[in-house]
Amino acid sequence: MQNKVIVVTGAGNGIGRAIALLLGANGAKVVVNDLGSNGSGEGSDVSPAQKVVKEIRAAGGSAVANTDSVSKPESAQAIIDTAIREFGRIDGVINNAGILRDRIFHKMSIDEWQTVIDVHLNGAYYVSRAAATYFKEQESGTFVHMTSTSGLVGNFGQANYAAAKLGVAALSKSIALDMARYNVRSNCIAPFAWSRLIGTIPADNDAQRKRLERMQAMKPEQVAPVAAFLCSDAAADVNGQVLAVRANEIIVMSQPRPVASVHRAEGWTLETLAEHAVPAIKRAFTPLERSPDVFCWDPI
């Protein structure tokens, strides 16, 4: 990581902070971006980003703070401009900024939907697009995007967040396909770690409380090495992947592929769909599961 210039969004707290500190400790020059808003995206505060910068510099590293929002094209461009102005180049982007505005779907407001989409999905696009021009010209660069099993698998009360995070996985794959010819890589991490966002999730029953207790055992510092590694030259062969990081586990997540098919030469009718197609392929249907149903074991 020596002298690589890496932008980390949402780096004032939690996973982003842990990544920024690790990058700084390993010789990278870090743009510590954080708007300083609360967990739902309200307000702003320069101190979280500045505090992380001070920690990196106190340990002998190089870093600069940026407090622009990822949710607008012009401010996302300003984040990348900070890297170019302060360090003269950009080598990696870690799209980590995020908020939560959870609500059961039939009660979710348009604002709750739009705000989460703007930060997670649009924000990942805006920041990545701003960096892509530099990556293409220098024929190198890495993107690391934070996705979530809420989108990859499913969860209650998170239609906005789940849609954005599944969109981020598709965005990452598209970037990987489009920019591989320029030696640019794009990967996703689905992190499991305790953070202030996870702390906002309600625990109204024993199952929810047990899930949160399990999450508290998983630390941001366990995610950070994977994010930093994916930005390094040692990860040159890793592109277009989705890795779940859960305590000391690294899990390769599947990506949609055909799993079963059925054919009828004369075509389908409503009756033959019910009598033939569904009975033949139902065994391959994906259960209506949530992330805690799939990741049901204690973290290792």
Image: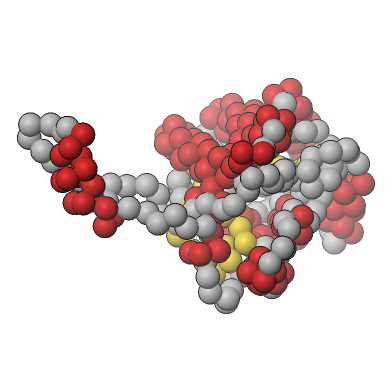
The quarter holding residue 226 reads: bottom right
Relative to residue 292, is residue 300 depicted above or below? below
Residue 202, horizontal then vertical, whole percent: 73, 58
Q: Nearer the viewer, residue 46 or 274?
A: 274
How is the rendered protein coloured?
secondary structure
In the displayed structure, would residue 30 be above or below residue 293? above
The residue drawn where x is 28% and y is 47% is 258
Q: In which quarter of the image is the C terminus?
A: bottom right
At 26% from the left and 57% from the top, the residue drawn is 283
Q: Evaluate whether residue 129 shows in this view.
A: yes
Determine the residue located farthest toward the top in the rendered image.
74
Above or below, 88 relative to 215: above
Residue nearest the viewer, comparing 174 with 231:
174
**Residue at the far front in the pictured view:** 271
In percent of the image, x 79 and y 40: which residue is there? Answer: 41
Count of picture labels: 0
Quadrant of the rendered structure where residue 81 is?
A: top right
175 sits to left or right of 5: left
The image quadrant of residue 229 is bottom right
The residue depicted at 48 percent of the width and 64 percent of the height is 294
Is residue 84 in view?
no
The percent position of residue 60, horizontal first and vertical second, equals: 84, 58
| Front-lying residue, 78 or 274 | 274
Task: Name the spot of residue 109 as percent of width and height, x first.
Answer: 69, 33
Q: Quadrant of the N terminus?
A: bottom right
Q: Is 134 or 32 nearer to us in this picture? A: 32
